Every structure is written in structure tokens, then in C-alpha cells.
Amino acid sequence: MGMLVADLRAALEAKPGAAGSTHPSARGVTLYKVMGKMFAILTDHKETSVILKCDPHLAEVLREQYAGVGHRSHLDRRFWISVTLDADVPPEEVLRLADHSYDLVRAGLTRKQRAELGDA
């Protein structure tokens, strides 16, 4: 069955400080950033997928567990995964992975940037 793109898009856009922008040269691609740092790439063209930052150990486990988790980008495969939305990854898991990606990127921000997002 797969996940509805609108649900994922809404979840990504709801993150504090998140901003989505379409890529001018790539149709159907939206980059999601927090404080200028990318945490998700949503592709809604031909095959719908999202590229997310991921803990390297978790990425290995997910690739073994799901056919819909792989690597499809120029980004370092140790730290980024591609999740096909109409594959075998449950929608709740996709949303958890989106949260995980955002949290990883947010944790790498400076103290000042995190303060601007409302972190103590």
C-alpha cells in the first residue's frame, strides 16, 4: 500500500525551523533543510522516495530488513538512506526515520542555531 506523500510532506514541513524548497533542475524533488542543513530529499516523480540521514548501524539493519530501503544518491551511503514509499516500509517507520534524520541534523547545529529553534 505504501505511505501517502502528503502525510510525509506535512510531517517534514512541521519540524521546527524546517524549510522545503524545490530543486529547479530536478522535477518533483523537494529539499528539506533546517538552518541551511539538509535532512530530507523527497522525490515525487516516477517512483516516490525520500532520502534521509541515518545512523550508520541503523542504516545497515534497515537495508537488511526492508527491500524498500537502499541507497540512491551521491550522498555518503554510510549516513544516508533512500526509502521507497510504496515498498515494504510501514508508514509509521518512515515517519520515525524522518524524525531521526531531523534530530541528527539538528544535533549537529551550533548552540546558537539550536537556541534559535527553541532548544535550551
Image (cartoon, rainbow, N blue to C red):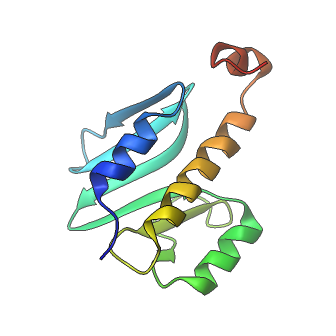
The vertical placement of 2 against 119, above or below, is below
**In the displayed structure image, the side of residue 112 where residue 64 appears, left or right:** left
**Residue 49: x, y in percent?**
37, 63
x 44%, y 42%: residue: 12
The quarter of the picture where the C terminus appears is top right
**In the displayed structure image, the side of residue 110 where residue 7 appears, left or right:** left
**Residue 114: x, y in percent?**
71, 22
**Residue 104: x, y in percent?**
69, 45
**In the displayed structure image, the side of residue 83 where residue 60 appears, left or right:** right
x 68%, y 66%: residue: 78
x 69%, y 76%: residue: 60
Toward the viewer: 79 or 114?
A: 114
The vertical placement of 29 against 110, above or below, is below
**Residue 77: x, y in percent?**
61, 67
User: Which quarter of the picture shows residue 46?
Assistant: bottom left
Toward the viewer: 43 or 9?
A: 9
* Label tally: 0
Toward the viewer: 13 or 79?
A: 13
The vertical placement of 5 against 104, above or below, is below
The quarter of the picture where the N terminus appears is bottom left
**In the displayed structure image, the side of residue 19 where residue 39 appears, left or right:** right
